[in-house]
């Protein structure tokens, strides 16, 4: 009962908080255009995510932040760099396969400013979500439940919150805008099969990120992975366009979910599994690879 009340309070606070934060970012956007360009539904989603996760944290019986067990990582920059590569390379290969299978076509291009916005968004979102999900939620829940159970439920939460659907409203943002978005929470026009594969893909991603956090006791590697995925997928959207709007080619490949940011289908899941394999090999040869990389940079 207490947990439900806390969750309700977290959601209500998020609904009222989203519009003022949006107005603040719009004002800051006069000096920092990348902030002013953020649409309301993205800001609302992040604040709702923070409110729900915060409520879940408060609901835990014990909150000992001293037991997060994250430690200083002497391989931090190497973990970040290798993580970026381990996420980016399989995603690039996946796009090449999509083009070869004629489910995508190449077109368009990208200018410097949109490229920098994508890079800044990838870094900012990755740091925020990894700190929230793996640094806080996963680590704190590990104080009460096993690593496997903690990874599983935080990954499901990670997946579900990413599939929240925007209302697409063009109504000017006012104090009630958060509640209007809430009305359309899961009113998605995506087919159930696409949503199901998106849920599986995001759960696999969440489990992988929890696993590398557990292995390294650090957020450097998961942040690098997260940045790699967001950067390649969103940059690729400037050059690669889907020629399919229905899930007709599932289970192998389907239209990307949530504004083209989540690849779905068995091929996408295999790409994430390839990233897991690369991370597993890296962690087994971590010290030697980092020494070789350091020598090559000298």
Image (spheres, grey):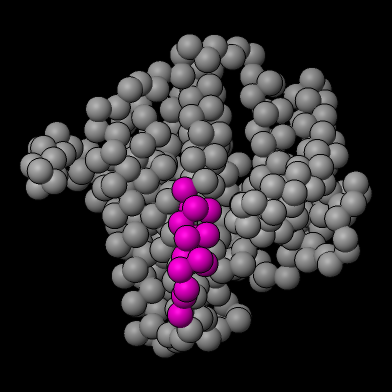
**Residue 83: where, in percent of width, then height?**
31, 47
User: Is the magenta region chiefly helix, strand or loop?
Assistant: helix
Residue 113 painted magenta: yes
- Left or right side of 70 for 155: right
Residue 234 in view? no
Q: Quadrant of the N terminus?
A: top right
**Residue 38: where, in percent of width, then height?**
67, 56
Residue 215 painted magenta: no
Looking at the rendering, the stretch of residues picked out in magenta corresponds to: 109-123
Going 86% across and 55% down the picture, which residue do you hit? 173
Going 37% across and 64% down the picture, which residue do you hit? 91
The one of 67 and 40 positioned closer to us in this rendering: 40
The one of 197 and 257 positioned closer to us in this rendering: 257
Going 52% across and 67% down the picture, which residue do you hit? 114
Picture layout, residue 232 above or below residue 54:
below
The one of 67 and 145 positioned closer to us in this rendering: 67
Residue 93 in view? yes
Going 54% across and 41% down the picture, which residue do you hit? 129
- Left or right side of 50 for 293: left
């Amino acid at each position: 009962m207490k947990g439900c009340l806390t969750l309700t309070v977290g959601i209500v606070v998020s609904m009222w908080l989203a519009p003022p934060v949006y107005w603040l970012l719009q004002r800051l956007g006069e000096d920092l255009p990348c902030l002013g360009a953020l649409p309301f539904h993205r800001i609302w989603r992040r604040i709702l995510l923070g409110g729900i996760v915060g409520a879940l944290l408060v609901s835990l019986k014990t909150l000992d932040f001293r037991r997060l067990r994250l430690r200083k990582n002497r391989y931090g920059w190497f973990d970040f760099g290798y993580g970026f590569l381990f996420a980016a390379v399989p995603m690039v290969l996946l796009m090449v396969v999509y083009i070869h299978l004629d489910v995508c076509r190449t077109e368009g291009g990208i200018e410097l400013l949109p490229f920098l916005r994508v890079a800044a968004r990838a870094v900012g979102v990755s740091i925020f979500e990894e700190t929230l999900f793996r640094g806080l939620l996963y680590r704190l829940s590990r104080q009460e439940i096993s690593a496997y159970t903690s990874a599983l439920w935080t990954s499901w939460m990670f997946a579900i919150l990413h599939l929240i659907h925007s209302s697409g409203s063009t109504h000017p943002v006012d104090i009630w805008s958060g509640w209007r978005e809430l009305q359309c929470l899961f009113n998605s026009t995506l087919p159930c099969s696409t949503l199901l594969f998106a849920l599986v893909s995001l759960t696999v991603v969440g489990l992988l990120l929890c696993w590398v956090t557990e292995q390294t006791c650090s957020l450097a590697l998961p942040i690098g992975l997260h940045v790699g995925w967001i950067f390649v997928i969103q940059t690729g959207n400037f050059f690669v366009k889907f020629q399919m709007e229905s899930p007709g080619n599932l289970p192998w490949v389907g239209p990307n979910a949530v504004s083209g940011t989540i690849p779905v289908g068995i091929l996408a899941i295999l790409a994430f599994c390839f990233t897991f394999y690369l991370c597993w090999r890296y962690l087994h040869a971590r010290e030697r690879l980092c020494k070789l990389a350091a020598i090559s940079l000298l």
